[in-house]
Amino acid sequence: MKWWSRLVAGASMVAAVSVIVRVCGLEDTVFFNKSAASLGVFFLGLILVPKAFGHWHEDRRSFLAGFGLAFVLVFTEILGWAMRLWDAGGSVILTGIGVFCMAGAAALLAFALEPWFYVILNPGRKGKTEEGGAAALWMERCSAGRIFFGAWGIIFLSWIPCALAFYPGLYSYDMSWQWAQFASGDFTTHHPLVHTLLCGGIIELGKVLGGSYERGLFFHSLAQMAFLSGCMAFGIRFLAKRRVRTWAMVGVLAFFALFPFFPVLGVSTTKDTMFAGFFFVVFVCICDMVWDKAFYRGRKLVWFEACAVSMCLLRNNAVHGLAVMVCCLMAVWGVGALRKMGNREKKRNLFFGRSIWLTGLCILLSQAGFWALEQGLEAGKGSRAEMLSLPMQQMARAYVYHREEFSKGDTEELLRFFDEDSLLRYKYYVSDPVKAGMNMEEFRMGDFFRLWFRLGRQFPGEYMLSPLYNMMGLWYLGGDSSCFVSYEMLPPFDEVHKVEAKSKVPWLKAYYCWFTDENLQRCLPGLCLFFYTSFYSWCVLFAAVMLAAKRRYKELIPPLFLGSYLFTLVFGPCIIVRYVLGVMMCVPVLGVMVFSEQGRI
């Protein structure tokens, strides 16, 4: 670039930051234009922007991928920051013009961030030995079974201190209602029936063997930890089978063993722990089939379908995620079928077509399983309010911020569906306070959605902001409530089925309980990213963009599987760790797959 072009680039960076300061209402607190910070941004633009334009001439495909990621990342961070300031009462210009200015500033700043993404998208290639290096030598000495059981033992034993710290376990989340159903035999589909049966049965069996419900709950904690760590060991075995580098395999193993949220949720009585285990196994199997470019047959196919069906039986939105995945695959397959293709493209399209059939079979079998359990247990239907988190949050937000503008008829109809106190307890990051006050006796689907549509036309801004706020845990890296994990015990549902916290290592319990949003942001700058769910959804997006940029299209199926599930969380009550636990387990394996030379097509 010529000298005057470099000056324009540096000045543009300064102008972009100035726009952000203005739009976010920070003039009284940030004197950017009068500080050395503006000079730093200017010289940063002088250095990085020319590199970005150089990448445009070197490899336009990689440049566009890197610039696109940089723009989305910068824009979402600016928007998330502005929304947090707006919620706190700041003078943010959160209008159409304001968002347009944010997007323009993000586009300019993305040029400075693009070189970093370009380097990651184009890593230097190192030569490999013919036999695959140290990992191959290790594989020659260790069988797959020894690797599996060794990894299983390491992970499980590393979690034992957590089990003792929270002895007899974390009786939390929805288990009180599920255990009550198991004890009474009066089941509903509000919670997964298979999880209610499994957990209730394991606790009761532990009580018979140990003589008390505390020991029964501890037996459940150990059984669940063994299951989850076994699933992780299955992933380590897969990496060893693929002959990835030893340091990468050890890094994944260390993450599984030491990341604190894994053992905490391993001893928690939430359906999401077992779901995450099956979700991870299904993901690993998908990676195995994609990497080998061949589908399972015989016993392997039965194993895969059994794990997929179990996954779906533990969370309804797993089925919805598979349905989204099928729709995406059908779109890609249909586009391919309509145009002329070479032999390579025909093979790839055939692979996508078979993936559709395999995923569709999972959906059909899981629906059959749902029906069989519901009929066999004579279970009642769950509350329909669970499916309405998104519209009820939109309506509640409109009421809280604009109730004076509501017509008398709309106010009366809204208060027929909801208690006013529940509407006023609206929190942007979780729908439970509003959902708790929904009057299902007065609920009529047609009337509800007609009111929802009328209010949406009157308050379109709040209807757009509400889901953006609710799913910040998927896109905003700046920190939010998505790192929430429950460390508290629920009260007993009757006098007989009682369990109490009796920590064997109180100081270690305090260590695990330290990992909260406030402590993480204050004491672990930078490192706290790994504890927020948004980091893992960004990893999935980055992996997908990198694979697409390198034309490794078949390998897009694993990130598509993860992305489809994450998409279903948009319609859920909130974004927290337990809902994204399976994705957090999958991301390290996905990263190894993406960066492995053997993964290239």
Image (cartoon, helix red, strand yellow):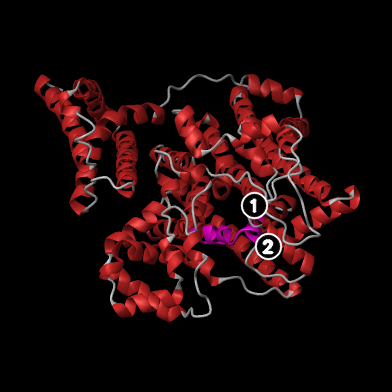
For this orientation, the residue located farthest to the left is 4
Residue 360 versus residue 461: which sits nearer the camera? 461
Q: Residue at x 50, y 74 (%)?
A: 439
Q: Residues within 10 Å of mark 1 (few under 14, many from 20)?
A: many
Q: Amino acid at mark 1?
A: Phe
Read off the residue under disc 2. Answer: 177
The answer to whether residue 391 is left or right of residue 163 is left
Q: Amino acid at mark 2?
A: Trp
Instruction: Specify the segment rendered in magenta.
Output: 311-324
- Where is residue 571 shown, x and y percent of the image? 46, 60
Question: Element at badge 2?
Answer: helix
CA–CA distance in space, label 2 to label 1: 18 Å
Residue 554, can we see it?
A: no
Residue 77 versus residue 185: which sits nearer the camera? 185
Numbered mark located on residue 29 in the image: none
Q: Is residue 525 above or below residue 348?
A: above
- Where is residue 250 shown, x and y percent of the image? 63, 26
Question: Element at badge 1?
Answer: helix
The answer to whether residue 312 is left or right of residue 419 is right
- Where is residue 222 shown, x and y percent of the image? 77, 42
Numbered mark located on residue 275 in the image: 1
The answer to whether residue 407 is left or right of residue 525 is left
Q: How many marks?
A: 2
